Amino acid sequence: MRGVGPLVAAVTALWALVVLISQVWAEPPLSPVGTIVAGVLLTNVAILGYGSSLRGPRQQRVRARPNREDTERRAELPERPVGLTDEVVDAAVELLLPLLGGDAVSITDRQHMLAFAGPGHDHHAPGTPLYAPAREEVLATGRTVTVTGRDGDVIRCPQPGCPLRSAAIAALRVGEEVIGSVTVYRGTDDPPEPDLVEAAARILSLHLSVAELQATQQHYLDFELDALRAQINPHFLFNTLNTIASRIRTDPEDARQLLVRLADFFRYAVRQQGQFADFSHEYAFVRTYVTLEQARFGDRLQVEYDIDPAVLGAEVPVLVIQPLVENAIKHGASGKVGRTTVRLRARVDPLTRTLQVAVRDDGVGMPTATHEAVLAGRATRDDGGVGLRNIRSRLDLLFGDRHGFEVRSEPGKGTSVQLQVPLR
Amino acid sequence: MARSEMGPGTPRGPEEFDGPAEVAAAARTQRRIALGYGLLFSVAILSVPLLSVALPWWSGARLVGGMSPSFVVAAGGLYVFFLVVAVAAATLARSVEDRMLGSSSDEGPGTER
Amino acid sequence: MTGTDTVSLMVLAVVGTLVSVVAWRRTRATTVDFYLAGRRTGMITNAGAICGDYLSAASFLGVAAAVYASGLDGVWYATGFAAGFVPVLLFIAAPLRRLGTVSLPDFLAVRFGSARVRIAAVVAVELIILSYLVPQAVGSGVTWELLVGEGIAGLTPYTTGVVVSTVAVGGIVVIGGMRGTTWNQALQFGFLLAVAVWLGALLWAGGFSYPAAVEQASTQPLQAVVGERLVEVPNQLTGEPARFGVPGARYGTLGQLALLVTLVLGTAGLPHVMNRYFTSATGRAARTSTVWVLGLAGAFYAVAVMLGTATRILVAEQADEPWLAELTVDGVLRVPEHALLVLGRLLAGTPGLAVVSAAAFAAMVSTIGGLLLAAAASFGHDVVARIWRPSGGPREAVLAGRAAVLVISILAAAAAIAVDPERLLATFPSLIATMITWAFALAGSALTPVLLLGIWWRETTARGAVAGIWTGAAVAVLALVMGLILGPDVGDGLSAVLFAPALVAAPLSAATIAVVSRVDTGPPVDPRLWTRMHGTAADRQAERLARITLRGRR
């Protein structure tokens, strides 16, 4: 829905229609220049319209339950190295079998057979224990070993009719750690080429290491997000509850509305799944938050939103914009006596396909120490810089260096945070 | 005082509430949309009489049987264009409203748990 | 030539209207009910009612007449009428409904918090309504003349038509209220559309080819009846004889521009059409209704243009028929307004004529009804209940509204009788459509700029609004009066601009508003008001209630 496919189709259809009307149906046909001008104009309109419109159906705000697969995969994690899923190892042995010049191929972890292809697969089924004593050596040392002949019980298969007579065994590694083995078997006493088997095992190992790294990053991201959710500022909750309590007598209707909004706030913050959400959801979250803060600060806090319609359907990292606004309010309204204005501006740059979010306040500005700490990527909790630091590190993980994050602060004049993330 | 007569047509329940700042933002965005579509609309309808002066082909050629392109557009094409603009603008305006106003829990089907 | 069946059919239409009004009338109407049908009307019903208000004699007889008389340049009326709803949809529909007022003057008064704005707006509204009523009455007079051909109680046939329609509709509005007319308007629009489509289907069944008809009509120069002779119409663009399918039969470029701008801007300021928006359930429903209006009205106008084209061909072919010979000079209709009526008779005999006449009367009745109601609302509600006697209570306001209906219908009928269609027809080829543009010009000059700026520009002040309304109305009236005095043949494009002055008056009015508001140091708009006008809280609440109700029913 969000790609340029529909646009290409629309522009093609437009040109076809223009040519058909002005050249084929019309008598006499329009001059070619006229046709081209008309086509170019219509194309421009289509492109502008496409860029500035909202696309895609509105997604549901809160997913009711966490994804079941996620939970299962997490439950498996301690037992099996990341990446060695059943599908992967099954596919791998089928792929390796014709390549490595053996009659059968197997992949194991440190205790069990994971996958086996070739003659003997009936009794070397996945899940059976490992027999060959030579594999113990491989798992222990990481060296590649070849074994030959049934007589020496080198494979030591308990099945009397097993056709396998020789094998080459290589270690599977993630990083430095040996996590399993790749074995190539032959039905003759001439063992498979060990170098070939080792090369295959190394390729597999490399793949596993990458998968492991990605999983680690994912865990780290989840962890950061959890940290952010968990650190919804206790002062904020405390202050809001105080505000509500003080209104219950004077303005019960207002208090009720605030309670509803507070519930909204927590529902969104806690239930949010995944790393991305529609901008409009994040925007609603920000508005909820601002309403609650405005109840506390009253006229002292003014907020101005300036949102381009094309932004609303874009996907943004979750819980990124609200902490920026919270930060602005914290450094603006809290420390200042007079009125503070916080401005949230969001635009899409269609050329670079980036989303630009700016949060500015005209408050007291950050203390220089905090500002430097934020710039350097470290901050202590007391400074309120945790939000910014957390956002920074999550953006680094999500986008690498394809994003921009800029904090400017002048004491007495206010702070401005600018964020640029690629559109997905 | 002027409101007391408004009658039961506009119930203002406790849960629904718009903040001035968010409405101001939504209105600005809506204004931008309306002006954009307004521009498109003006250009389209003004181009028809202007083309009949600037481009002889426009009223001289024959498109469907005996009609000139100008006649086809004036007698039928523009109505289709108006409808397309109307549907597009109304859809966009509505989805902007949906996304820029209202709290995060009052979604239609999402709230029915 | 009038069969008793024709008259009885008309009587039937009028009686049907009355019956439905009485049936829908509630026993005790409150003020809001009287004006606004209790503010709860379905989306498509409302769209149909808006069309019923909007599609008047000008649309039903006038568009076909304009196309008959001026070919492609007449098509611009249809385009302009339909196009007018696009700005309404983009800029006006939703905020208008959301502020939750009763009439256009009420809306402006609440927006600017000023009684002066209210008075200025009421004056503009009554002026617009009056100038809109006159061509409707002229239309009923012309139809009566052709259909019945005899006067009652010593009046001329034309005068009789004017009086009968005015008395009938005025009575309906005074007795009933808008609730009756909302359904009526929608039904009447359905009837109009059905008649137009039926005529189109008859044409199609008879082997009619639209493109071929345009081609055929364009082969000879366009002719019009002046006095008892045929004259060739000059092309305003080239000076050659004008042809049916070629632009320029009526307007130069400037004239076309002026007409378009006038019609497009005018729709947003028509009180009787805009009043319908206050009866929408929500702001969103108002917007969606407008989308429907654009679809329905577009379909209607496309068919009407085709019917006008067909009449040009068929009348020329069958001018030998004795009854038609009376109405034509060498195969060209004397009065273009007769085009659709003649087409009905050509296609389906006397019953066809009767059906088209009934539809024309329905169009006039529904529009006159809407106009009178808007007049009543702006006078009864805005002048009496808000300014004159705020303590008077709703009963008094309704009474005042009814009185206003009587006064304004008498005024309109008098003006229509004073207008001598025979004389004016010589100067304006399609009189009804032309006179309607004058109402559009007033509306587009006086009310549309202040609506647009008031809704979308926070800094607009009450003083700016008052100045804008007066400026727009004054410039438009001045231009129209000058145009009528100087006649239609001054200057190149000058007369065209004088007869469609919104091209000049609306920008002037907008500039006045902007300048005065900038200079003025009045208070800015109340943020709560702005929130109500542009926010969706009430919409969401209404939609949520509707959802709960629906779920409860399951």
Image: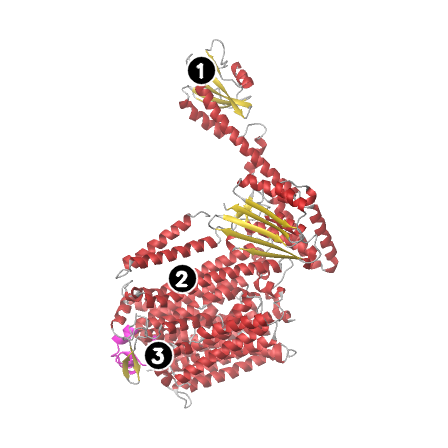
The local secondary structure at tag 2 comes to helix
Q: Is residue A144 above or below residue A14?
A: above
Q: Is residue C99 above or below residue A189?
A: below
Task: Please report contact status of discs 2 and 3: CB closer than 8 Å, yes or no.
Answer: no
Q: Residues within 10 Å of mark 1 (few under 14, many from 20)?
A: many
The amino acid sitting under disc 3 is Pro
Mark 1 lies on residue: A164
Residue shown at the point (54%, 50%) measured from the top left: A356
- Residue pushed farthest top? A151
From the viewer's side, name the closer residue of A81 and C251: C251
In which quadrant will I find the C terminus of chain C? bottom right
Q: Residues within 10 Å of mark 3 (few under 14, many from 20)?
A: many
From the viewer's side, name the closer residue of A58 and C445: C445
Query: Quick check: can you spot residue C33?
Result: no
Q: Is residue A51 above or below residue C172?
A: above
The amino acid sitting under disc 1 is Leu
Label total for image: 3
The amino acid sitting under disc 2 is Phe
Magenta segment: C312-340
Whether the magenta-drawn stretch holds residue C283 is answered as no
Q: Which mark is residue C429?
A: 3
Residue C497 point in image, percent of width and height: 41, 76
In the image, taking residue C337 as reference, residue A343 lies left or right, namely right
As measured in the structure, the alpha-carbon distance from the residue carrying label 2 to the one carrying label 3 is 29 Å
The mark lying in front, picked from 1 and 3, is 3
Residue A41 point in image, percent of width and height: 38, 58
Q: Which mark is residue B81?
A: 2
Query: Quick check: can you spot residue A269?
Result: yes
Residue A354 point in image, percent of width and height: 50, 48
Q: Chain of mark 1?
A: A
Residue shown at the point (33%, 65%) measured from the top left: B72
As measured in the structure, the alpha-carbon distance from the residue carrying label 1 to the one carrying label 3 is 104 Å
